[in-house]
């Protein structure tokens, strides 16, 4: 997004004599999300913009002049996308596919091309761009902290062909080697594990309670009940305890990528 919007928001906040935290409290948002909007790294939702207008007494300026948003995601994922952008820590479990924020363009296109009903090339392009835009949160060297727990099936199921798989795994290896993300693999040899029912994302924030997001076929659900989130976090921790250590997981991903390269 153009940073004109973020700079104007910052100017209005400072003119009102508010800190980012004070504005966040008044607008029922997180301080980190305010900071991202002001820096031009995030676009507020329409509801966020309306709350900012009310908190700053700016009429409907912030809600009327939102930057163009070409974000294309499934309807059930929209709320989760907003939370993902605000999170300070993201823990992913993937059962079938590489998590969205870790996907390469070619891998994402291969995944999205399997949707039903089929999407046209232009719509597929929009979906791929959105997925790659989500990955830009990794451009910040520290926040959010990202952990990914991958079922070994994610590495073995060929998506887009051997060349695409090799590129995808090399991309993840590079992120792990840089220290930007941690990845652990749940090996086939483990057998049944407690996360086999669906994918799961755990989201932690600077100044609001954690939430969880689970997803199945054409459906996604945000869990914000403290008891349910605590239960899902415990399930994730249990599975993580059975996963391969970081170094061994990295070795497996390198070897698997090399194997795909030899198949090309």
Image (tube, rainbow, N blue to C red):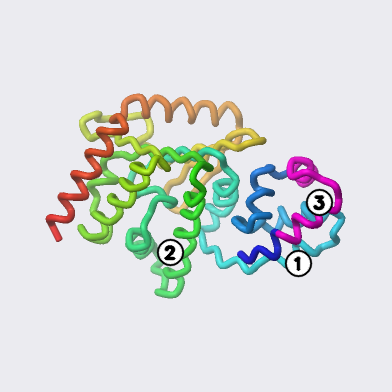
Instruction: Choose top left, top right, bottom left or bottom right for residue 40.
Output: bottom right
Residue at screen point 24% across, 50% down: 157
The residue singled out by tag 1 in the image is 64
Residue 128: image tag = 2
The segment highlighted magenta reads 7-27
Numbered disc 3: secondary structure: helix
In the picture, measured across the screen, residue 47 lies left or right of residue 161, that is right
Image quadrant holding the C terminus, namely: bottom left
**Residue nearer the viewer, 245 or 187:** 245
In the picture, measured across the screen, residue 123 lies left or right of residue 229, that is left
Marks 2 & 1, CB-CB < 8 Å contact: no
Inter-mark Cα distance, 2 to 3: 37 Å
The answer to whether residue 61 is above or below residue 86 is: below
Instruction: Choose top left, top right, bottom left or bottom right for residue 211.
Output: top right
Residue at screen point 65% across, 63% down: 3
In the picture, measured across the screen, residue 71 lies left or right of residue 28, that is left
Q: Is residue 25 magenta?
A: yes
Q: Residue 122 location, x and y as percent?
A: 44, 75
Of tags 3 and 1, the one toward the viewer is 3
Q: Residue 250 location, x and y as percent?
A: 27, 39
**Residue nearer the viewer, 28 or 179:** 179
Query: Mark 3 vs mark 1: which is more N-terminal?
Result: 3
Of tags 2 and 3, the one toward the viewer is 3
The residue singled out by tag 3 in the image is 14
Q: Residue 164 location, x and y as percent?
A: 26, 59
Return the residue found at the far left: 262
């Amino acid at each position: 997004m153009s940073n004109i919007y973020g700079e104007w928001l910052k100017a209005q906040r400072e003119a009102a004599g508010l800190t980012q935290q004070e504005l966040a409290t008044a607008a029922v948002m997180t301080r980190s999300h305010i900071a991202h909007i002001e820096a031009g790294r995030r676009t507020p939702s329409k509801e966020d913009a309306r709350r900012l207008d009310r908190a700053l007494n700016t009429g409907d300026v912030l809600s009327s002049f939102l930057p163009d948003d070409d974000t294309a995601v499934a309807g059930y994922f929209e709320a989760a996308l907003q939370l993902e952008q605000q999170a300070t820590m993201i823990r992913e479990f993937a059962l079938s596919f590489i998590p969205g924020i870790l996907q390469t363009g070619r891998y994402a296109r291969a995944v999205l091309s399997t949707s039903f009903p089929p999407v046209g090339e232009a719509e597929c392009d929009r979906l791929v761009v959105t997925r790659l835009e989500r990955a830009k949160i990794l451009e910040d060297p520290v926040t959010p902290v990202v952990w990914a727990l991958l079922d070994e099936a994610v590495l073995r199921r060929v998506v887009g062909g051997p060349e695409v798989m090799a590129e995808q795994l090399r991309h993840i290896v590079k992120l792990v080697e840089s220290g930007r993300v941690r990845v652990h693999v749940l090996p086939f040899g483990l057998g049944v594990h407690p996360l086999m029912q669906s994918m799961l994302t755990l989201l932690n924030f600077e100044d609001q309670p954690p939430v969880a997001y689970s997803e199945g076929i054409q459906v996604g659900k945000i869990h914000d009940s403290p008891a349910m989130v605590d239960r899902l976090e415990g399930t994730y921790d249990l599975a993580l305890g059975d996963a391969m250590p970081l170094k061994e997981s990295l070795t497996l991903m390198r070897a698997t990528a090399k194997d795909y390269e030899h198949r090309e």
